């Protein structure tokens, strides 16, 4: 059976599947003012962060159902079916649009809600492909992936609250007070949502706390493969990687513009699947 693997542009693919011939990535949209741009196709992360730093109004949008219809119509003669792994359905309508697009195109699709995004979603896709290609039954693969979403760990800190306020995530007064008091929220993925779970005074203290949490996860064996992601602060992310050494597989990635548009420049975080 010939299977296509579909995901979206919030994903960060592990090196092992970076050039897999059967992976198809559907871009979400970054919107500058009223002008939409296809993420990773018409605009890159560097440009999006430049817009944010320049004070431009930047927002995001999911792919249209028609984008998925076009993809599925174009590949249905090449594949017997597809398996899609998408950004958490609580953060975006991408998963739903993919399912609806497949129905319209009459393309057989098994859709999986990653309840996550970025590198963690890429690791889930890697594990899924490994199991399919070794011959596991699709119902077993689906059941495994539904269990694996419980092992997602994504945490990040923000340098300031300005972009969240612009995106309507918090009020202008809360952003103003938080920035004045140097309150730095620590956010994490929880049940498919990005939620604040702690507030730390000063960006430096928040950095130290998150770094120590990652160190402990690596030392305990809970984390063996991790992405340190950042919002346009590569030097900071690279310094974390150097300090952590080679106890785990560590990579540095720019935070996907679709998330960075809401968190702003200066954010830094960690993304991994808990080791089995």
Image (cartoon, helix red, strand yellow):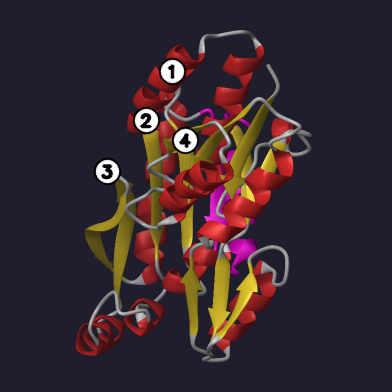
Q: Which residue is mark 3?
A: 191
Point 25% across, 77% down: residue: 170
Measure the C-alpha gap from mark 3 to mark 1: 19 Å
- Vertical placement of residue 150 versus 56, above or below: above
Callout 1 environment at 10 Å: few (<14), some (14 to 19), or many (20+)? few
Secondary structure found at label 1? loop
Q: Which residue is mark 2?
A: 151
The part of the image, by quadrant, that contains residue 122 is top right
Q: Is residue 69 magenta?
A: no
Which mark is in front, 1 or 4?
Answer: 4
Callout 3 environment at 10 Å: few (<14), some (14 to 19), or many (20+)? some
Secondary structure found at label 2? helix
Measure the C-alpha gap from mark 4 to mark 2: 19 Å
Measure the C-alpha gap from mark 2 to mark 3: 11 Å
Mark number for residue 111? 4
Image coordinates of residue 241 in percent, x first then y, are 61, 46
Image coordinates of residue 142 in percent, x first then y, are 43, 22
**Among the two numbered marks 1 and 4 on one chain, the one whose residue lies closer to the N terminus:** 4
Callout 4 environment at 10 Å: few (<14), some (14 to 19), or many (20+)? many
The answer to whether residue 112 is visible is yes
Give 5 or 210, whichever is nearer the viewer. 5
């Amino acid at each position: 059976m010939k299977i296509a693997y579909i995901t979206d542009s919030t994903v960060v693919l592990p090196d092992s599947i970076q050039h897999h011939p059967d992976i198809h990535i559907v871009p979400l949209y970054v919107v500058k003012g009223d002008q939409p741009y296809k993420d990773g196709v018409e605009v890159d992360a560097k440009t999006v962060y430049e817009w944010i730093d320049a004070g431009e109004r930047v927002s995001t949008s999911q792919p249209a159902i028609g984008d998925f219809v076009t993809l599925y119509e174009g590949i249905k003669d090449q594949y017997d079916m597809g398996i899609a792994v998408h950004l958490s359905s609580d953060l975006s309508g991408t998963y739903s649009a993919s399912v609806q697009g497949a129905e319209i195109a009459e393309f057989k699709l098994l859709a999986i809600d990653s309840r996550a995004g970025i590198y963690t979603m890429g690791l889930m896709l890697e594990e899924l492909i490994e199991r399919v290609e070794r011959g596991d039954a699709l119902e077993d693969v689906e059941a495994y992936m539904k269990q694996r979403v419980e092992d997602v760990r994504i945490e990040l800190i923000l340098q300031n609250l300005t972009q969240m306020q612009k995106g309507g995530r918090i009020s202008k007064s809360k952003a103003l007070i938080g920035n004045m008091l140097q309150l730095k929220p620590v956010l994490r993925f929880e049940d498919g949502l990005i939620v604040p779970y702690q507030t730390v005074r000063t960006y430096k203290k928040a950095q130290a706390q998150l770094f120590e949490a990652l160190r402990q996860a690596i030392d305990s064996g809970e984390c063996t493969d991790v992405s340190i992601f950042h919002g346009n602060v590569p030097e900071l992310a690279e310094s974390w990687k150097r300090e952590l050494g080679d106890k785990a597989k560590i990579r540095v990635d720019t935070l996907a513009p679709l998330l960075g548009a809401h968190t702003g420049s200066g954010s830094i975080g960690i993304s991994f699947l808990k080791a089995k």
